[in-house]
Amino acid sequence: MPGDEGKDLVRRAFAPLSDVMKTHDELYGPEWVGHFPGMPPLGPESHRMYSESMAAAFPDLERRVDDIVAEGDRVVARWSAKGTQTGPFMGAPPSGKVATSSGITIFRIADGRIVEEWAESDMLGLLQQVGALAAPKPGDHEHPNVQRFKRAIEARTHAVLSQDDRAALDDLFGDGVVWHGGPTGDVIGRGAVIELWNGWARGEQGGLAIDVRRVYADGLHGFTEVEVSTGSGDRRLTVMQGTAYELDEAGVVTGFWGMPSDGDIAASFAAGKVPDVHRNMAFFEEAEAVRNRQTFTDYDIEVLHRFLDEHVIWHGAGRSAFKDGARERENVITLYKMFKEITGGTFAMTYSGFYVGDNHAASFVKLTGEVGPKHMDFNELNLFHVAPDGHTFEFWGIAEDQEEIDAFWDPAAQ
């Protein structure tokens, strides 16, 4: 398309969000993919969720296209935005503050609709303006396995493994550990895994770089989020990767899976592209969007029935009233509803990353809500075991600080 028609389409995408939501399917194709710094590729349901959250947080949001050019199937817009935060946003309660932001977005157009975006914006500045970025709290109750995983991922960025690196990896990986979907296929055994562990950094997989973003762990699992990149300038390729690790009773890793897999990343980068979005991503995003709704429609229940196995297990954690989780689909759905009822409808989940593979799925989420005088503002990783069709048969919430969550739900502390 583009040219003037492409420019007009993009300008319509910067109309008031209430208008954009009414014409969303006219503006955006069903195969839409979004690429944003620090996040994996997002699907169309994530776009709807983000637009709805922005409209609720900044009802008077004004977005302006300051400059726009088009060539081939691409349109590039330099834009600015301004609005008053009168609703919750990214864990921050309404502040009444006027916030501004700006950025540049590249749009790919196909068949008269936007089907892909690459955006760079001052999200950090926006979060700081509304108080969504809390200062680190000294004395957080971090699970000891977090440091073990951080140390192992740090070793992966080294071109040469030191003696200390190898000792850290020996401590983490079990004798028969399996790296599922490794750079050369499944890699079996501690020695073989360690020999390939820093292959990216030393150039054996094309000289890729790894930037560690987030690390979560409990006594059963670990999860790491990294940015993997190769090349520079116009030839630079980047992809966000989440990796799920399973631990045995002794706390050593028995197997781990990348999303996307290291093999997919290596093959895609060699072909000059990023890995494709997983076939089940849109389904997972839709199911997570439903979980966040205050009330469930008949269609929402239908989605949850497709997503949750009839005998699904929600594994609890900590020492609160919810430490035992729930078993069976209807009991899990009931527990979803209880969270909303107990918090008087204030319970909300703000997502900041989704990962999906053939065996696992994961979402990073900020939990907010109110019970009496107490305010909930917690970060958590939700880790799911999934079947090939995308439905889940068990899942865990891995808290950044389990002690904080336990204290919030403790009736004695009301």
Image (tube, rainbow, N blue to C red):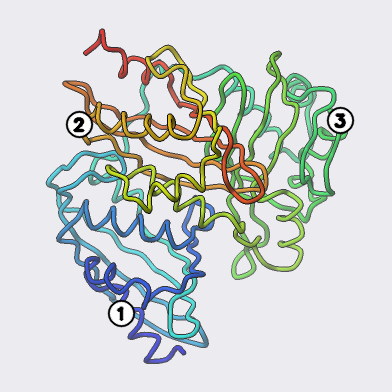
Horizontal side of 368 relative to 270 (left or right) equals left
Q: Nearer the viewer, residue 156 or 217?
A: 217
Q: Nearer the viewer, residue 266 or 303?
A: 303
The residue that mark 3 highlights is 189
At horizontal 47% and vertical 25% (from top left) the residue drawn is: 326
Quote the CA–CA distance across marks 2 and 3.
50 Å
Amino acid identity at mark 3: Gly
Residue 223, given in percent of the width and then of the height, sits at 59, 34
Query: How many residues crowd around disc 2 within 10 Å: few (fewer than 14), some, or many (20 or more)?
Result: some
At horizontal 51% and vertical 69% (from top left) the residue drawn is: 31
The residue that mark 1 highlights is 11
Amino acid identity at mark 2: Gly
**Quadrant position of residue 28:** bottom left
- Local SS, label 1: helix
Horizontal side of 246 relative to 320 (left or right) equals right
Determine which of the numbered discs, if any, sits on residue 344 in the image: 2
**Quadrant position of residue 291:** top left
Whether label 1 touches label 2, CB < 8 Å: no
Quote the CA–CA distance across marks 1 and 2.
39 Å
Horizontal side of 349 relative to 113 (left or right) equals left
Residue 409, given in percent of the width and then of the height, sits at 31, 18
Horizontal side of 75 relative to 102 (left or right) equals right
- Local SS, label 2: loop
Q: Nearer the viewer, residue 166 or 302?
A: 302
